[in-house]
Image (spheres, rainbow, N blue to C red):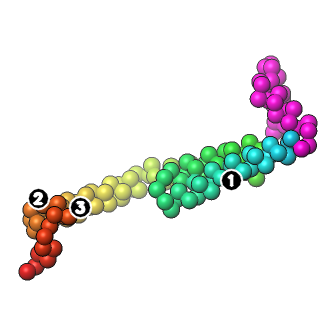
Amino acid sequence: MAINHEKDARPDKEPGPFHRFRETLRRNAVLNTAWRVGVFTVGATVLIGGLVMMVTPGPGIVGIVVGLAILATEFAWAQRALHRAKQAAERAKEKALDPRTKRRNTILAVIGGILAGAAVIAYLVVYGFNLPWNVEDLTFWN
C-alpha cells in the first residue's frame, strides 16, 4: 500500500517546517505552479548538465541521478525514471562483481599497463630523457 500523505508515514511526529511550507504552497494554485516550475527548471538543468557531462569531463552519472532526484520530489514520472535508474545501477553492480568479468577486466588492465610501459621504454630508447617538446629531430629512423 502506498503512502499518500506525509502524515500517514509519520503519525507520531509533528510535521517539519518544510512540510508546513510545502502544504502552504499547495493550497495556493499560483504558488504551487510556481514552485513546480522552479523545481522542474532546477531539476532539468541539473539533468541536462549530467547528460552533457556524459560526453565531456565530469561526473555525468551523478548529475543525472541528482537531477532525477530533484524532479522526483514533485513529479511521478521522475520517480519512475529514478527507480529504473537505480535498478539499472544495481544490475550493473552485480555484473561488475561477476568473477568472470573481474578476471577479464584485470587481464585487460595488465595488458594495457604492459603496452603503456613498452611505449615509455621505446620512447626512452629512441629519444633518451628529453621531453617531447625539447626533441629537435622527431624522425628516429634517419
Rendered image: mark on residue 44: 1
Q: Label 2 sits on what residue type? A: Phe
Q: Which residues are magenta?
A: 1-30
Is residue 11 rendered magenta in the image? yes
Along the polypeptide, which appears first: circle 1 or circle 3? 1
Along the polypeptide, which appears first: circle 2 or circle 1? 1
The residue lying at 53 percent from left, 53 percent from top is 60
Q: Are marks 3 and 2 in contact (CB under 8 Å)?
A: no
Along the polypeptide, which appears first: circle 3 or circle 2? 3
Rendered image: mark on residue 129: 2
Judge depth for marks 1 and 3 and give the one in front: 1
Q: Label 3 sits on what residue type? A: Ala
- Where residue 13 appears, as percent x and y from the top left, is 79, 20
Write down the quadrant of residue 3 in the picture: top right
- Where residue 142 appears, as percent x and y from the top left, is 8, 80
Q: Label 1 sits on what residue type? A: Ala
Write down the quadrant of residue 118 in the picture: bottom left
The residue lying at 86 percent from left, 42 percent from top is 32
